């Protein structure tokens, strides 16, 4: 048998990646056009949806067919209907919605990822190359309170999936007061108080985030045990606690800034106090998982930070004064690391 007669390698990975962006863009288009919102009241036929959404009838019908194939829509006697997944995560009326983050991905990250080769060559985020933006980029993105609110609600949707897994990754029952630094909408603090009845918590975030956090926390059954307060964890004193949480915070920053923050946390903690880090962990041999590696590239494009292995987080934590570092994968969008002050 000659080399040309040998069976060729399986092309499936290449073929899948060749078209993967098409699936993402199909979902984004459904959100942007308002397909899922239009179906919240019940099934509708394609012609009626096209008239309601101001879309070309045949083109919309083809998009709807594709959304059925992606299991975001289902066929019904009256036309098309949302699946439970779409209703929960892709409609503006759902408290679990991720639409704000989906729009951010479609309108901002999509373009930044188009500059991935440029970011790899330059070794830095591509805001200037892609958008011409200098200065605080999030001020450019969230130019109105409405845009900021929807982005935070999108991240809240992620948190509702991840935070219950994070707080059950370790036995945290010995801790009495949790301070969630950069805690956004308070989903981690709420999840922790739900799991540990003796725990009280405080959520610290920037002043513009506090009103939404207070709104969402106050609607939960643990609101009497969760305080929300404004502050900057780099510049302001930290709330008193014997357990600090940093959820999707450390991956935003350079090593120097991470060490500054971790040392501040460690100095504030009593002996035996802990820090709970919620980030997606790259395998120690760096062979995966895919979600962590894609997020690592996303950090290259968006921030000065990166995703790390458990070993790399353990090194940073020990240098900051922590010991007994342990990590757990959760099966959720973020994993968990717990370290204790010596």
Image (cartoon, rainbow, N blue to C red):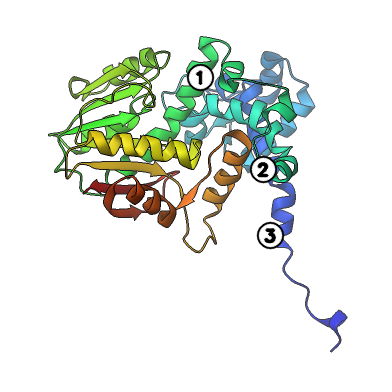
Q: Secondary structure at mark 2?
A: loop
Residue at the (47%, 59%) spot, across then down? 283
Residue at the (50%, 19%) spot, across then down? 150
Q: Nearer the viewer, residue 321 or 278?
A: 321
Q: Quadrant of the N terminus?
A: bottom right
Residue 144 image offset from top left, x and y in percent: 55, 10
Q: Secondary structure at mark 1?
A: helix
Residue 219 image offset from top left, x and y in percent: 28, 18
Pointer 2: what residue? 123
Residue 215 shows in this picture: yes
Residue 78 shows in this picture: no
Mark identifier at residue 13: 3
Mark 2 closeness class: few <14, some 14–19, many ≥20 residues within 10 Å:
few
Pointer 1: what residue? 150
Q: Nearer the viewer, residue 15 or 73?
A: 15
Q: Is residue 339 above or below residue 298?
A: below
Residues under numbered marks 3 and 2 in contact, where contact means CB atoms less than 8 Å apart: no
Q: CA distance from mark 1 to mark 2?
A: 30 Å
Q: Is residue 94 above or below residue 241?
A: above
Q: CA distance from mark 3 to mark 1?
A: 35 Å
Q: Nearer the viewer, residue 332 or 45?
A: 332
């Amino acid at each position: 048998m000659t080399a040309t007669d040998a069976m060729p390698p399986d092309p499936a990975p290449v073929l899948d990646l060749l078209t993967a962006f098409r699936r993402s863009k199909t979902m984004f288009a459904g959100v942007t056009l308002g397909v899922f919102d239009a179906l919240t009241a019940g099934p509708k036929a394609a012609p009626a949806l096209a008239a309601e959404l101001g879309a070309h009838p045949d083109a919309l019908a083809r998009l709807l067919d594709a959304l059925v194939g992606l299991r975001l829509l289902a066929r019904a006697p009256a036309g098309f209907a949302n699946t439970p997944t779409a209703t929960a995560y892709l409609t503006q009326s759902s408290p679990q919605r991720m639409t704000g983050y989906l729009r951010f991905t479609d309108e901002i990250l999509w373009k930044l990822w188009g500059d991935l080769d440029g970011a790899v060559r330059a070794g830095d985020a591509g805001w200037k190359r892609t958008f011409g933006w200098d200065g605080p980029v999030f001020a450019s993105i969230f130019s109105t309170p409405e845009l900021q609110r929807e982005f935070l609600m999108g991240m809240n949707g992620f948190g509702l999936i991840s935070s219950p897994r994070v707080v059950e990754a370790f036995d945290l029952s010995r801790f009495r007061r949790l301070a969630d630094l950069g805690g956004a909408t308070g989903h981690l603090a709420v999840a922790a108080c739900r799991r540990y009845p003796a725990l009280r918590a405080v959520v610290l975030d920037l002043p513009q985030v506090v009103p939404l956090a207070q709104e969402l926390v106050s609607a939960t059954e643990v609101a009497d045990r969760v305080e929300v307060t404004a502050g900057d964890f780099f510049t302001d004193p930290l709330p008193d606690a014997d357990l600090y949480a940093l959820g999707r915070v450390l991956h935003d920053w350079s090593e120097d800034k991470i060490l500054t923050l971790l040392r501040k946390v460690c100095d504030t903690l009593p002996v035996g106090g802990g820090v709970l880090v919620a980030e997606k962990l790259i395998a120690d041999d760096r062979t995966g998982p895919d979600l962590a590696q894609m997020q690592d590239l996303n950090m290259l494009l968006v921030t000065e930070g990166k995703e790390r292995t458990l070993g790399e987080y353990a090194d940073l934590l020990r240098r900051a004064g922590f010991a007994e570092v342990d990590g757990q994968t959760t099966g959720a969008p973020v994993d968990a690391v717990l370290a204790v002050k010596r």
